[in-house]
Image (spheres, rainbow, N blue to C red):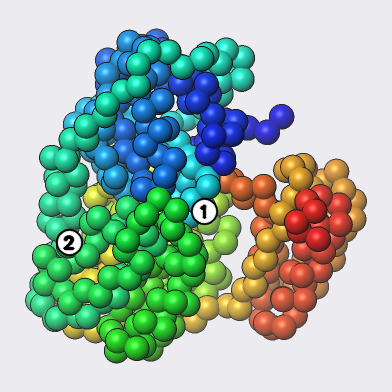
Amino acid sequence: MNKLFGTDGIRAEAGHFPLDDDSIYTLGKALIKLLQEEDFFPRVLVGKDPRNSSPKIERVMCRGIKDGGGDFISVGIIPTSAVSLLTKKHSFSAGIMISASHNPYQDNGIKIFSSQGTKISEAWEKILEDHIRKSREKVKGKKLNIIPDFHLSQEYAQFLKNRFRGTSFYPFKIVVDCSNGVSSFFAPEIFSDLGFYVIPIHCSPNGKNINAGCGSLYPQNLAQKVMDEKADLGIAYDGDADRALWVEENGRILNGDYTLYTLSHYMKEKKLLKSEYVVGTIMTNLGLEKALKKIGLKLSRTQVGDKYVREQMIRLGANLGGEQSGHTILSDECPTGDGLLTSIKMLEVMVSKESSLSTLVSDFKEHPQYSTNVRVKKRENFNLYPKIISTLNQINDSLGHSGRIIVRYSGTEPVARIMVEGTNQRQIKDQAESMAYVIAEHLGSKSSK
């Protein structure tokens, strides 16, 4: 039986299990029951992204919270990380974000944060999941009229502005791709208030255009705009703005490994790092590991998922970690990854150094990587299929010590992800495609063939 909670909460097509009304209502009541059993006063902060399904999910969830004996405050449309931050700062017993992040508008999701602003434990996830599977209830009571507390969203915006600590100022021109998501309501104004010349694109949410051909999934469009405008930097967000990717002034797209490289150098120089470790994932480029070693730092890898990065950071006492996808955690500032915060810190480096991003990352040499995906019918153990394992072993053997292959399931979609890293771009592409073919042959859904 597939788990309802993936690496980033519950995610599904809106209106379908487990994002049907009965499941959402039951989840709201079950969360309050769990909080009470754990001796919390059940007071919950709720935020959402601008998908057309988000307001209804919020109403049904809050109905469940209220009927369960809890209290809630809505903060309206806001980044996921803001819910995390405000939950901890204002001593809420839990925080809820309604968003499917980078998924298309038809999908939605529910992310739940602890009182400390971190993702809830897998033990709590299991308790809540059991309630949904075993004791779903019909939605009761009248439709709620929810009025957001905009003071909290203004507080979050001011928090971001206060995080900019540039030692001098250089008037950079930046293009901001807001993915028609939550950053549309924050990024252009915040960066303009900080003194940057801002060109916003994909900044008009209509409920159905979130992530549609824009944002962090489609940075090529941003790259073209940066070149056309002769801008100094392009920033691409996903729908809930917890990740950020970059386009440097020459139009080159840079992922989250470049974020870790840039910030680790700067933070080490400023004596801001609390550990010799920077935390990445199994997908983090070997080139970053080598680059960190040159400046006396170590890369610690964990499984993909920002909550696993955060857990590893806590274990190692590290205050910088992140993923290639653009999630970056600056734990001294915020409990979770925040794309807007990361952007402000990257701009701080550029301003302080009076340097372009291309110059700042010029010494980082990536190893060639090739990634591809296969849609699957369900996430079955790869070890059950000898042909998959034999192909995986053959590729591993051929790569030797000069490369690696990673085969894993997505934590948010029915997708197998394959990444091969090596020294020859054509070879690793062929190897990744061969692996994908075998997985599709045994596990693929009709749409993947």
For the question of whether residue 40 can be seen, the reply is no
Residue denoted by label 1: 104
Q: Quadrant of residue 83?
A: top left
SS assignment at label 1: loop
Which sits in the foreground, 242 or 330?
Answer: 242
Question: Which residue is most to the right?
Answer: 386
Amino acid at dot 1: Pro
Left or right relative to 424: residue 444: right
- What percent of the width, then of the height, locates residue 145? 27, 26
Amino acid at dot 2: Ile
SS assignment at label 2: helix
N-terminal label among 1 and 2: 1
Identified at 14% across, 81% down, the residue is 171
- What percent of the width, then of the height, locates residue 420? 68, 69
Quarter of the figure with the C terminus: bottom right
Residue denoted by label 2: 190
